[in-house]
Amino acid sequence: MSSTETGDAVIANPPNTRPSWVTEGNAVSESAVEPSVGSVFEVRDVSVYYDDFRAVTDVDLDINENEITAFIGPSGCGKSTMLRTFNRMNDLIEGARMTGQLLYHGIDLYDEEVDPVAVRRRIGMVFQKPNPFPKSIYDNIAFGPKIAGTAESMDDIVERSLRGAGLWDEVKDRLKDSALGLSGGQQQRLCIARATAVNPDVLLMDEPCSALDPIATGRIEELMLEMKENFTIVIVTHNMQQAARVSDRTAFFTAELDSTTDQRTGLLVEYDLTTTIFSNPTDHRTENYITGRFG
Amino acid sequence: MVAVTTELREQLRVRRSADTGGQVFRGLLTLALLISFAALVAVILTALTRSWPILSERAIDFLTSSSSQDPTKAGVFQGVQGSVLLAVITGAVAFPVGIGGAIYLEEYAGDTLFSRFLQVVVRNLAGVPSIVYGLLGLAVFVQALGGITGGRSVIAGGLTLACLVLPVVIITTQEAIRAVPSEQRQAGYGIGATHWEVIRSIVLPSAAPGILTGTVLSIARAVGEAAPILVVGAVSGFFQTGNLSFLEQMQSFFTALPMQIFSFTRQPTQTWGAHAAGASVAILLVVIALNSVAIWMRARLDRRLRK
């Protein structure tokens, strides 16, 4: 049976037809949460290494469609590392490698046949520090569609993306001005617009508000709630209130000493509905963290 | 209470003597700047006063006249022409090759033993004396490739100078590429750009001002070099360009300003001293012109990127 094309086949396959780096004998475990809508990502026993250092260990979780999933936890718990596996950004870091399996709509994202560039066109990313290109506002938005190729008129894409990010009215008269002249909050919304301009399916946000003031943060949060109609959003945040305000589900990560390697490694402690995590966590470590007793 | 206030006031009082070290250091820095500036002024003033006998009487004529045995007729036109040609050839070769090499080293070579070896070689080549490049030019461009360059010609000279500036162009380009914030690259990759698209559309435009300034400055420096072109056969004194075609001129004898300065200073009679100084002024003008181009291009690119 030839079975490398479709994701279903990959899941159904016995271990010996999986890529060699998938640990054998790891049965697909039950995720903490039953998918309510349909999973965009299924994470199975994923560990990420930087050379010999294991940054995050054996993560299992599902990310649901059109929901906002928040990753919270103390510094060094591997939540950003985990986020960056979803669009293969870790590929760009020398020495980084992953074990386990990460399915995107049932397709193994780390299959040899999968092009990371094509992945990143469908799974957009917004970074911690606003990072517009030193180009005009217009050219920032047009960059992605231009390299991806599009039949739609560029002016329409730019307007639609900027409206989607709630930035259109503020910048419509100065589209040709440099994006670097915008305020921090505007720059971050421009980066969101830039990421959405290529019509992605998922938006990964790596602490998108950590460099912004509370008002700009509030605007981004409103925006996220509007955008989840069209996108699946995964956000890493240090701000627990933010996770509580915007997310449907929350994954709490922490860093603990791995007795086999004697190094600290990140692990997923608990993953559940946000309301449950914040009102009635199962694990005492989660409770300690959200009540501010550590981290 | 009063006592506490008095004590606090005393602690907060300005102490003039407190920052003596800082003041001394500041003075030394100012002195260093003044010394560099004084050296530059001295060079320019010497060149101008010594060449005054010529510049005051026939400044334009001196620049537009050909070489001659007659001090009252001799000019540096061929030298200016030769130097400008050398600069153009040097730039045309060193610019693409150097930038290409730097992009390869920074973006594609990775961190292997071989790439580190290349890196060390490039850094060392930047420190090799220019006369050694002259010998390289003599062996390679004059003798081995004589059929193409025409032997001792302006092409051979330009190629030699290109080799001389290549390491500097590579190093400055690498520095400029490294200075592009990694957030910019990440943004590009994050949106689905390929490695080449990130280089072309993000890295190179951001690095362009630095690359251009570094490259043009190194070419300006090379244009003033006498040693390498002396070895590859710049001639001094009197020669005929006549009515040769452009290609033939490129493949034939040439001279350049540093060469002419050198030969003027070797003339026995006092009369030629002013010529040497005059040619120095001419070379300063060429260098200033090149530097102005670099500054102008940098400002233009900066404005395009930021505003």
Image: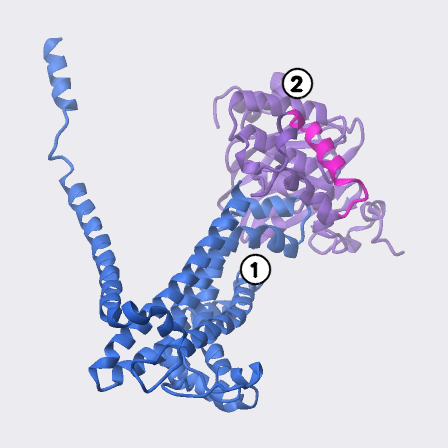
Chain colours: A purple, B blue
The disc label shown at residue A65, or none: none
Which of the chains bears the disc numbered 1?
B
What x and y, as percent, mark residue A139? 65, 42
**Front-lying residue, A169 or B187:** A169
Q: Is residue A52 above or below residue B247?
A: above
Q: Secondary structure at mark 1?
A: helix
Q: Secondary structure at mark 2?
A: helix
Q: Residue at x 57, y 25 (%)?
A: A286
Neighbour class for label 1 at 10 Å: few (<14), some, many (≥20)?
A: some
Residue where numbered disc 2 is placed: A275
Residue occupying the far top of the picture:
B1
What x and y, as percent, mark residue A35? 78, 29
- Left or right: A5 in relation to B141: right
Based on the picture, tell me whether residue A162 belongs to the magenta stretch.
yes
Dominant secondary-structure state across the stretch colored magenta: helix
Residue where numbered disc 1 is placed: B107
Examine the image and state in which quarter residue B62 appears.
bottom left
What x and y, as percent, mark residue A116? 70, 50
Q: Amino acid at mark 2?
A: Thr
Q: Which residues are magenta?
A: A149-169
Q: CA distance from mark 2 to mark 1?
A: 46 Å
